[in-house]
Amino acid sequence: QVQLVESGGGLVQAGGSLRLSCAASGSIFSINDMGWYRQAPGKQRELVAVITSGGSTNYVDSVKGRFTISRDNAKNTVYLQMNSLKPADTAVYYCNVMVWNGRNMGDYWGQGTQVTVSS
């Protein structure tokens, strides 16, 4: 099994910054894509950013230029640096990791961390 532990959410004023972290542990042979999703009240969960094992990144248009996703393969950790935050960024943020355990590929989710941006 694989466990994901998220940290870094909180309350911030518009224009502020937060950094989310998600550390994976357990039966890990290698990690493929790592990503961040978010879900605002009454809305569907959406992909915010993804980073491949090779370091390629992709972002939803609404966060381009403001958010940066990165990963530390030695620590099995993915980060989301969020700058110039807006009230529209308020949501529960979830990390998602694709893990190869040597036999199977698994899709794992973090527990979610609340990000609230006040105007």
Image (tube, rainbow, N blue to C red):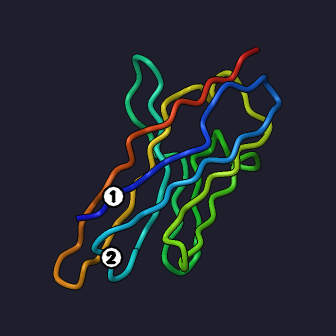
At 61% from the left and 47% from the top, the residue drawn is 20
Q: Quadrant of the C terminus?
A: top right
The percent position of residue 7, horizontal first and vertical second, equals 55, 45
The percent position of residue 55, horizontal first and vertical second, equals 58, 75
The label shown at residue 28 is: 2
Q: Residues within 10 Å of mark 1 (few under 14, many from 20)?
A: some
Q: For residue 116, which quarter of the picture?
A: top right
Judge left or right: residue 12 versus residue 113: right
Q: Which residue is mark 1?
A: 3
Residue 25 or residue 116, whichever sits in front: 25
Q: For residue 102, which quarter of the picture?
A: bottom left
Residue 25 or residue 36, whichever sits in front: 25
Q: Amino acid at mark 1?
A: Gln
Q: Is residue 32 above or below residue 3?
A: below
Q: Amino acid at mark 2?
A: Ile
- Badge 2 marks a residue whose secondary structure is loop
Residue 6 or residue 59, whichever sits in front: 6
Q: Is residue 54 above or below residue 42?
A: below
The percent position of residue 59, horizontal first and vertical second, equals 59, 53
Q: Quadrant of the N terminus?
A: bottom left
